[in-house]
Image (cartoon, grey):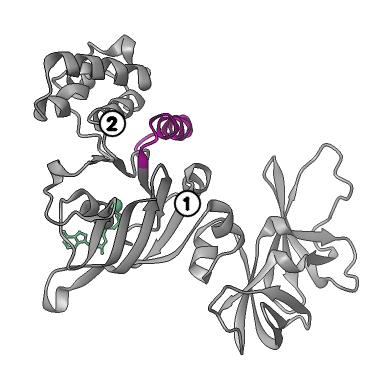
Amino acid sequence: KNAIEVRGVRKVFGTGENQVAALDTVSVSIRENEFFTLLGPSGCGKTTLLRLIAGFDFPTAGEILLHGQDIAPLPPFKRPVNTVFQSYALFPHMTVAQNIGFGLEMLGKSKGEIEARVAQMLRLVKMEALKARRTSQISGGQQQRVALARALAPQPKVLLLDEPLSALDYKLRKEMQIELKRLQNETGITFIFVTHDQEEALTMSDRIAVMSAGKILQVGAPRDIYDRPAERFVADFIGETNFLQGTVVAKKPGLATVKFASNATITAGYPEGFDPSGEVTLVVRPEHADLVPDPAKGTIAGMLSNIVYFGTDTHYHVKLDGGENFIVRHQNSRSSPVTYERGAKVGIQFEEDAARVLKD
Ligand code: ADP
Ligand code: MG
């Protein structure tokens, strides 16, 4: 079942020459109990979409349904939706417990009900010990927990989270990622999470919508998006990718054979709805390719131009004979079988299904 359906939503700001289409006809369905992420670079329209769902602003065109019902007539406070902002927006002069109970008080809940719910929320975010502290006297990570508890207290059906972790330092951010996943699991509330951090999106989400310039380019599970990007932008924005330019020389259903400057040919799959012909781009993830010591038949020949050690893995930069740059990533083990030297002649190879043909 769908929690939220966004149907043909457009949002235009400004008039005349200053018009900006912050959302350029977006449609997406978000399921109940899902951890759904909007991922895209700054300015692509993520916050705008959240604001429309929350009711802080209205679409120029299109509609938004919540459990099948058009929510346009509902003001923000009547929507079963709550938002956690990047800036937390806590009341510094109030205690942790007062902050968590604030929304419930606004809703006119009884004193007993508020106390019980606040106690429950304090347990959920593990802040019982600090309930009487003012929020100006707790750390950033603790403030984040209070902001979450406050947003969850009125039991919204959908929680909107606008880059809630971006103000935290790396280690705390990693901790809070796990914490957020746990909260979503335990409460069963639909989370719509916004981030520009692809790693965060991959590790946390049930599904991801990749956005660029007011459009949703692809929606899918993290593995789908990573292994089967639908567009060059998606492949480039998520993870590291090798791009090779080539020409289609043969085609059969679902597979295209592409010829490159290095005179090699590769046969690979392509996204549904794309009809490869002429100039195309081939994408290959660095960890899906292998380096072989001798440029043998079935490999693409090149020269090892650089070796970069990362601890867990090593990046081998290969200058292909056709002039392209290609990176191969090997996981390091205690017994790496081959050692390579810079300047060596090498070959690269990868399975057919590791490569993908996309629009040039
Ligand atoms: P994101 O959250 O992905 O960084 P936003 O949704 O904030 O992106 O913004 C999308 C686009 O809409 C940007 O070009 C931004 O400048 C523009 N925009 C957002 N809000 C307004 C506004 N209130 N008035 C004018 N332009 C806006
Ligand atoms: Mg934003």
Residue 45 in sight from this viewpoint: no
Label 2, ligand 2: CB separation under 8 Å: no
Magenta-highlighted residues: 166-190
Residue 313: percent from the left, percent from the top? 71, 45
The vertical placement of 289 against 141, above or below, is below
Is 185 colored magenta in this rendering? yes
Q: Which mark is residue 194?
A: none
User: What is the spatial separation of the Cα atoms under label 2 and label 1, in whole angstroms?
Assistant: 21 Å
Quarter of the view holding residue 119: top left
Three-letter residue code for mark 2 = Leu
Q: Residue at x 51, y 70 (%)?
A: 231
Residue 152 - label: 2
The structure residue drawn at horizontal position 25% and vertical position 27%, both measured from the top left corner, is 153
Q: Nearer the viewer, residue 187 or 141?
A: 187
Dot 2 or dot 1, earlier in sequence:
2
Residue, disc 1 = 207
Residue in the image at 33% along x and 9% along y: 129
Q: Height in image: 215 above or below 336?
A: below
* Drawn side of residue 174 relative to residue 163, left or right: right
Q: Residue 160: x, y in percent?
A: 30, 44
| Horizontal side of residue 322 vs 141, given as left or right | right
Amino acid of disc 1:
Arg
Instruction: Say above or below: 97 vs 325.
Output: above
Assess whether mark 1 and mark 2 are in contact (beta carbons under 8 angstroms).
no
Q: Quadrant of residue 177?
A: top left
The spot of residue 100 in percent (x, y) is: 22, 23
